[in-house]
Amino acid sequence: MIQCPQCGNFVPPTFVRCQFCGRDLSNIARAVRGASSGTTAKEVFYYILAGLWVLFGLLGVVLGSLAYAGAFGEEAATEEMGLDFAVAVVQLLIGAGLLFQADWAIAIARVLCYITLALGVLGLICVWAAFDAVRLVLILLNITLAGLQLWVLSDF
């Protein structure tokens, strides 16, 4: 982390501008990574997760396009499909933004992770009462993935 000389807040060393005050940080000295340190686990996870955002978004766009074209029969094309297609396009755009470390994509991904955590906890309460083991495992997996994404995004 580097400290912004204008506002005093700490920002990740990959940032070119302070996320708090907007000051240009390109002329601030940063520690040079040694040849032996290599890539961190967070960086690897970051690009894996960004790739998953892109992959799932692309999959939704392709499947939505095929369904709209009637490849799965007329009953596959529903009104809800338009919303599914729009969500897939947004997911694809966020994934592309994450791959390029765009601040807006990182911010949106964080918000979506917090929403996922909140809904996951609510889902746990509902599923725990009915004790549906499969849904319980899926919700725990979703919560874990959202938590992992927040941990990874904490350095970006």
Image: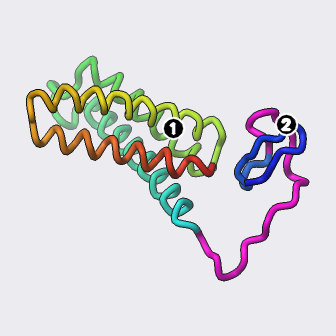
Looking at the rendered structure, the secondary structure element under dot 1 is: helix
In the image, is 132 to the left or to the right of 22?
left
**Residue located 59% across and 35% down the image:** 107
Q: Which residue is mark 1?
A: 109
Q: Is residue 51 magenta?
A: no
- Disc nearer the start of the sequence (1/2): 2
x and y percent of residue 132 in the render?
Answer: 9, 36
* Vertical arrangement, residue 1 with respect to residue 142, above or below: below
Choose between 36 and 94: the one closer to the eye: 36
The quadrant of the picture occupied by the N terminus is bottom right
Q: What span is in magenta?
A: 17-39
Q: Residue 72: x percent and y percent?
A: 18, 36
Instruction: State yes or no: discs 1 and 2 in contact (Cβ < 8 Å).
Output: no
Which residue is found at the position 49% from the left and 50% from the top? Answer: 50
> Which residue is most to the bottom?
36
- How many C-alpha atoms fall within 10 Å of the one at disc 1: few (<14), some, or many (≥20)? many
Residue shown at 59% from the left, 70% from the top? 39
Q: Secondary structure at mark 2?
A: loop
Q: Is residue 105 above or below residue 31?
A: above
Q: Closest to the observer: 100 or 61? A: 100
Q: Total of numbered circles in the picture?
A: 2
Q: Identify the mark at residue 136; answer none if there is no mark.
A: none
User: Does the segment drawn in magenta span residue 37?
Assistant: yes
At 14% from the left and 25% from the top, the residue drawn is 75
How many residues crowd mark 2 within 10 Å: few (<14), some (14–19), many (20+)?
Answer: few
Q: Which residue is mark 2?
A: 7
Identify which residue, 56 or 29, lies in the foreground.
Answer: 29
Residue 122, given in percent of the width and then of the height, sits at 28, 26
- Residue 120 placement: quadrant: top left
Residue 26 is left or right of residue 90, and the answer is: right
